[in-house]
C-alpha cells in the first residue's frame, strides 16, 4: 500500500503545512491536539523512507489525558509527562475518504468550505423556469377554455318546422339460386364438384446446418486502482486499492440445426349446387312529412312473402337564430309533439349533441 505523508496546521500559533511526522509544532512547541485535521497537498508523492512508512503503519496517535500531548501508538507512556497510556485515552480518528475527497487544507484554512455533502446550497433558479411556468399557465388556460366551449351547454327556444317519417317492408321471393361451398346444405342439389386447395399445412421437411456468431464475456484479468485514501490518524495517509475483474468479449462460431418446412396444400371437395330459398327481392316504402305514418302496401305475387320491417321518425326544429336541428324519436314520443309547437332545446358540445328539454 502506498503511504503518503500528510500535513497539519497549528491552531495555537497559526503555523501551516507542518509535516505529518511531527507530533508537536516546530514553531511554538505545542503538542498536536486531538481532532487536528490532517490533509494531503496536491500531488503529494509517496513516502519512500522506510522509517516513515513504519511510523505510518503502527496505528493512530493517542492523546495523553493529563497533558494532552500527542503520542505514537507504539509507546506506553507519554513522551512529555510520563503518564501511562490508559484504555480510556482518546485516539486520533481514522477516516476513510473516497477518491478526491481527502482534505487539501488544514484547520488554519478558514476559506475551506465544510464537506460538500453536508452543505445545503440553495439551487439557483434556472432561467428557463419562469418560461416553463408561463407556458404551463397558458396551456392550462387553453384547456379550460377548450373545455368550456366543448362542454358548455346552452338552452334555446325552437319551434317544430316539420315532421318526417319512413316505413319499409322487405319483400322476399322463393327462388332457385346457385351457390358454392365446401358442403352442400340440406335441400341443395349438386351441379358440379372439384378438388380445390382449402388450406396449407406446415410440414417439417428437414433440418439445415447453419452457423452463427455468439459472443461471451471472458474474464482475462484484474485491474487494481486507487479507490480512496485513509487518514491513519498519525499524520500519514494510505491509498486504498480496489480490484475489478477485467472482461473481454470473445466471439465464436457455433453451428445449429434450423428446421425447414414445406407448405403442403390440403385439398377438399368444393361444390357448386342449386338450392331453393327465400332471397331479398325488393323493398316497399312509405314516407311522409306529417304525423300520420302508415305501413306501405305489400302486394305479394306467387312465391313471395313479407320480410323484415324498418321504421324511423324525425322532427326538424328551427331555433330563433335560424338554426335547424333534426332529431330522431321513437314512435310514441314522436306522436306526442304538437305541430308548430315551441320547445326548449339543450345544445351541448360543438352543437352536435341536441336534446329536447321537457
Ligand atoms: Zn504552533
Ligand atoms: Zn502527557
Image (cartoon, rainbow, N blue to C red):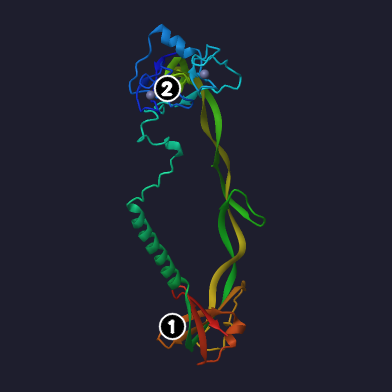
Q: Which residue is mark 2?
A: 30
Q: Is residue 130 in view?
A: yes
The quadrant holding residue 300 is bottom right
The quadrant the C terminus occupies is bottom right
> Which residue is located at x 52 percent, y 14 percent?
73
Mark sitting earlier along the chain (2/1):
2
> Which residue is located at x 42 percent, y 11 percent?
52
Residue 297 percent coordinates (x, y): 58, 82
Label 2, secondary structure: give it.
loop
Residue 59 percent coordinates (x, y): 51, 16
Q: Nearer the viewer, residue 284 or 141?
A: 141
User: Looking at the image, is mark 2 or mark 1 nearer the viewer?
Assistant: 2
Residue 19 percent coordinates (x, y): 37, 18
In the image, is 353 to the left or to the right of 183? left
Seen in the picture, residue 57 relative to 233 is either above or below; the reply is above
Seen in the picture, residue 106 relative to 240 is either above or below; the reply is below
Label 1, secondary structure: give it.
strand
The quadrant holding residue 279 is bottom right
> Which residue is located at x 42 percent, y 22 percent?
30
Q: Nearer the viewer, residue 33 or 331?
A: 33
In the image, is 118 to the left or to the right of 171? left
Give the numbered dot on residue 324.
Answer: 1
Amino acid at each position: 500500500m502506498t503511504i503518503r505523508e500528510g500535513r497539519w496546521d497549528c491552531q495555537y500559533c497559526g503555523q501551516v503545512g507542518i509535516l505529518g511526522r511531527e507530533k508537536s509544532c516546530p514553531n511554538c512547541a505545542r503538542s498536536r491536539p486531538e481532532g487536528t485535521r490532517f490533509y494531503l497537498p496536491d500531488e503529494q508523492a509517496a513516502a519512500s523512507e522506510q522509517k516513515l512508512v513504519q511510523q505510518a503503519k503502527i496505528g493512530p496517535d493517542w492523546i495523553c489525558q493529563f497533558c494532552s500531548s500527542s503520542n505514537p501508538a507504539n509507546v506506553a507512556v507519554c513522551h512529555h509527562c510520563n503518564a501511562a497510556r490508559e484504555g480510556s485515552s482518546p485516539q486520533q480518528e481514522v477516516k476513510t475518504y473516497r477518491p478526491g475527497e481527502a482534505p487539501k487544507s488544514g484547520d488554519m484554512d478558514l476559506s475551506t468550505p465544510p464537506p460538500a455533502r453536508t452543505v445545503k446550497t440553495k439551487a439557483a433558479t434556472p432561467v428557463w423556469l419562469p418560461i416553463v411556468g408561463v407556458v404551463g399557465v397558458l396551456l392550462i388556460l387553453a384547456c379550460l377554455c377548450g373545455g368550456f366551449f366543448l362542454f358548455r351547454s346552452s338552452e334555446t327556444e325552437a319551434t317544430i318546422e316539420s315532421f318526417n317519417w319512413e316505413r319499409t317492408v322487405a319483400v322476399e321471393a322463393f327462388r332457385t339460386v346457385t351457390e358454392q361451398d365446401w358442403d352442400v346444405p340440406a335441400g341443395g342439389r349438386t351441379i358440379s364438384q372439384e378438388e380445390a386447395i382449402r388450406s396449407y399445412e406446415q410440414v417439417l421437411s428437414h433440418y439445415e446446418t447453419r452457423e452463427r456468431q455468439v459472443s461471451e464475456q471472458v474474464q482475462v484479468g484484474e485491474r487494481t486502482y486507487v479507490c480512496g485514501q485513509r487518514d491513519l490518524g498519525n499524520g500519514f495517509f494510505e491509498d486504498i486499492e480496489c480490484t475489478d475483474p477485467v472482461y473481454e468479449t470473445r466471439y465464436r462460431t457455433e453451428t445449429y440445426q434450423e428446421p425447414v418446412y414445406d407448405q403442403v396444400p390440403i385439398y377438399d371437395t368444393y361444390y357448386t349446387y342449386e338450392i331453393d330459398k327465400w332471397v331479398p327481392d325488393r323493398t316497399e316504402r312509405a314516407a311522409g312529412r306529417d304525423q300520420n305514418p302508415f305501413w306501405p302496401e305489400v302486394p305479394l305475387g306467387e312465391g313471395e312473402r313479407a320480410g323484415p320491417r324498418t321504421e324511423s321518425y324525425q322532427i326538424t326544429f328551427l331555433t330563433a337564430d335560424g338554426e335547424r336541428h333534426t332529431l330522431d324519436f321513437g314512435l310514441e314520443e314522436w306522436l306526442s309533439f304538437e305541430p308548430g309547437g315551441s320547445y326548449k332545446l339543450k345544445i351541448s358540445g360543438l352543437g352536435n349533441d341536441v336534446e329536447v328539454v321537457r
